[in-house]
Image (tube, rainbow, N blue to C red):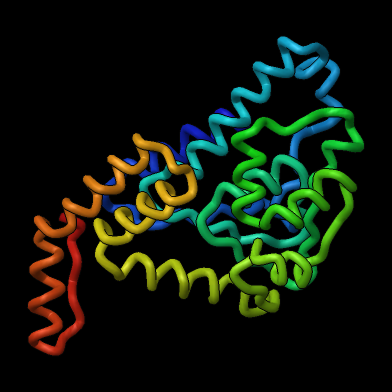
Amino acid sequence: MWVDLARHVLLLSSNPDIRVIVLSGAGQDFSAGADISEFDTLRGDADSARAYEATNSAAFAALRNSAIPVIAAIRGICFGGGFGMAAACDLRIATPDALFAVPAARLGLAYPQDAMGDIVWAAGPQMARYLTYTAGRIDAQAALSAGFLLETVDPERFDARVGEISRTIAENAPLSVRASKAAIRAVLSRDAGDTALARAAGDATFLSDDYAEGRAAFAGRRTPVFKGR
C-alpha cells in the first residue's frame, strides 16, 4: 500500500492538468492503518522494521511534499498509519462519526520523526502527546477542536462539500496555490532547501501568464481563466 500510494501521489502531482488530490478510503473507513497480522514477517526485527518505516515515510513524504494540495476525506476509522496519512495531507474533512487513534504505544513500536512531525503540526503538541502516550481514541469533535480537522460534514453532504472545496482550489491560479503550499511548508520545516523552493515558486507567479490574466480579469470585472503557466 505504502509504495503504491507514494507512486500515485508523485504521478498525480507531476501532472500539470491536475490541481488537487483527494485521498479517501475505498470502503466505509478511511484507513485502519497497517495490517498488524503482518508485523511478524514485515517488522519482526529492527532491520525489517526500519525498512518498513522507510516505505511508510516515503508515502507520508509524497503527500507532504506534493506540489499540489491534498485533501483527506475521512469517513469512519482513521487509525495508526491512516492517521499518519491524514496528518501529512493539507486539509482534512471528516464525517461526525469518524474516529481517530495512534495505537503505537499498545503495540510497542514508535513512529519515525517525520511522521510525528506531521502529527504535531496537524493536531498540535498537546493532542499529539495525548494520542501517542495513551493510544486513546478521539472523536471528530475532539479532532475538530484540536485543529486537526478543517470541518465536519454530515454524510449526506460529505461528497458534495469535498467536491466544492476541491473545485474552488482548482479554479484558482495553480502556480499561486503551489507557491502558497511551498511557503507554508518552508514555514513549518524551517529548512533552507524548502525556503529556496518557496522563494522560487513565489517568483514564478510574477512571471506567469496567470498573473497577467488575474489582473486583466479584475480590471474587466470577469472571472479569470487560469492555465497554470
In the image, residue 89 above or below residue 215 = above
Q: Is residue 99 left or right of residue 91?
A: right
Question: Residue 82: x, y in percent?
Answer: 70, 45
Q: Residue at x 62, y 79 (%)?
A: 157
Q: Residue at x 87, y 37 (%)?
A: 105
Q: Is residue 141 left or right of residue 229?
A: right
| Quadrant occupied by the C terminus | bottom left
Q: Residue at x 65, y 66 (%)?
A: 147
Examine the image and state in which quarter residue 176 appears.
Answer: bottom left
Tell which of 191 and 150 is nearer to you: 191
Q: Is residue 220 left or right of residue 7?
A: left
Tell which of 89 and 201 is nearer to you: 201
Examine the image and state in which quarter residue 108 appears.
Answer: top right
Q: Residue at x 40, y 47 (%)?
A: 186
Question: Residue 32: x, y in percent?
Answer: 77, 45
In the image, residue 39 above or below residue 76 = above
Question: Residue 174: x, y in percent?
Answer: 27, 59
In the image, residue 4 above or below residue 214 = above
Question: How many numbered marks appear?
Answer: 0
Question: Residue 21: x, y in percent?
Answer: 45, 54
